[in-house]
Amino acid sequence: MKILVINTGSSSIKYELFDMDGQQRLAGGLVEKIGEKSGGLTHQKVLGNGEIRRHTEHGPVPDHGQGLKRVVELLSHSEHGVITNKDEIAAVGHRIVHGGETLTAPTVIDDQVIATIRELEPLAPLHNPGHLKGIEVARAVFPRAVHVAVFDTAFHQTIPPHAFMYALPVDLYKTHKVRRYGFHGTSHAYVAEQAARYLERRPEETNLITIHLGNGGSMAAVRGGKCVDTSMGMTPLAGLVMGTRCGDIDPAIVFYLGKRLGLGMDALDNLLNKESGLKGLCGANDMRELLAKRDSGDANACLALEIYAYRIKKYIGAYLAVLGRLDGIVFTAGIGENCAPVRSMACADLEGLGIAVDEEKNKAPGRGIRQISPDNTPVKVLVIPTNEELRIAQETQRVVETL
Ligand code: ADP
């Protein structure tokens, strides 16, 4: 079975085509700057020997429909393509950021599901409108395929009320849906499943803390395969320090800055989401850039790294208390998979809690799943590459097989 996974933004379409029989990625790419003057497309075809053949196009892409049509042409192109006919694609898995409280599992897309995703737009104004565009054009381009929505929020819907409610007037939850939702759920779910398999344990009997550190970052406490708490909140601004987002702060800072600096809502939103985090602390939102600054003796970069790792460590402690017993800690995504100093600092001095990192293993280069804790510590610290697209394809396949 071939499954196309698409992640549509307001001006972009990311796509990956999988052959589910061998769980193989066949092709993938990105259409960018849709509707702008200088659009473009990058396409990758995976060759038989695993090598990637790249193809790039420059030029305006007037709308999402034209963008997706071009993707289909490339997927069935004599040189760049991997299929002969678009009807080979049995299903399309759509990444949807927000499923709210009703869309809590991968779901076949029908008019009712579309209406619900639309109702949730106020909770995900930057994402859900683009996703809806993607659904509309993909249904037109692939009328015979099954379309499945896979939600970033779904994995976190097992979080109990005492962990998802805020201490605000309860009507704000009942009427306005103000609560913790959590994000990156597809990634947390994928690495939690992989970790249980690697540890040769049944997921139902495995307690994990999963740490997704990309440009955004979040952690999850996973008890027996189910999420019981996560660091992001009603929006992806809460929790860890991120590239440009502040994570947890005293909410009163917002009023203080509003009054003292005369900043309006939009300016404050921009400050906390786009100008804070690592960027605000040291001028570099990219971890590699931060490390280069630190290595050249930049004191702000040193401090930014300490603040970043300290926040992760605090959540490890909190989630250890939440779970009571811990089998593994998983680091994933760009920083989690590649940045040894962050892993080492976040787990430093936790031997008393059964957590340690073996520096040699931590620094050793590697691409697949690997253990970086000493063999004799009770909690296994793992690095697991995430693969959100493959997970969406797997979820989509599961739904198709039940039809
Ligand atoms: P996104 O959230 O956009 O998917 P990624 O998961 O790709 O982001 O993570 C991007 C982050 O990973 C950036 O801060 C980048 O600097 C960091 N990163 C990637 N490779 C390395 C590396 N070798 N060492 C340290 N940080 C890295």
Image: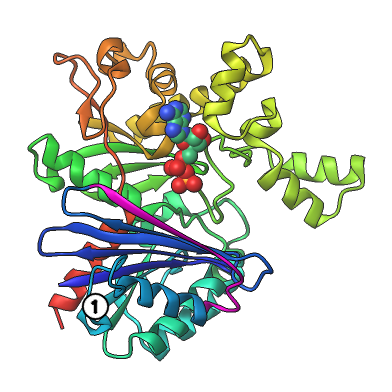
Q: Which of the 4 quarters of the picture holds residue 34?
A: bottom right
* In the image, residue 322 above or below residue 353: below
Q: Is residue 20 magenta?
A: no
Give the crowd class for mark 1: few <14, some 14-19, many >=20 residues within 10 Å: some
Amino acid at pointer 1 = Ile
Q: Say which of 278 and 20 sits in front.
A: 20
Q: Say which of 134 and 61 sits in front.
A: 61
Give the secondary structure at mark 1. Answer: strand
Residues in magenta, as a range = 51-64
**x then y, percent, for residue 277:** 63, 35
Please state, as top left, top right, bottom left or bottom right, where the C terminus lies in the image. Answer: bottom left
Instruction: Say which residue appears at 51% left-offset and 22% top-offset.
Output: 310
User: From the viewer's perspective, is 151 left or right of 167?
Assistant: left
Q: Which of the 4 quarters of the picture holds residue 289?
A: top right
Q: Is residue 231 visible?
A: no
Please state, as top left, top right, bottom left or bottom right, where the N terminus lies in the image. Answer: bottom left
* In the image, residue 184 above or below residue 278: below
Instruction: Say which residue appears at 57% left-offset and 62% top-offset.
Output: 178
* In the image, residue 194 above or below residue 366: below
**Which scheme is used to colour this image of the protein?**
rainbow
Instruction: Say which residue appears at 29% left-offset and 16% top-offset.
Output: 357
Q: Say which of 287 and 322 sits in front.
A: 287
**x then y, percent, for residue 370:** 21, 28
Mark 1: C-beta under 8 Å from nearest atom of ligand 1: no
Instruction: Tell how many labels.
Output: 1
* In the image, residue 225 above or below residue 365: below
**x then y, percent, for residue 272:** 70, 44
**x then y, percent, for residue 266:** 79, 56
Residue linked to disc 1: 89
Q: Can residue 127 be seen in this view?
A: yes
User: From the viewer's perspective, is 119 left or right of 74?
Assistant: right
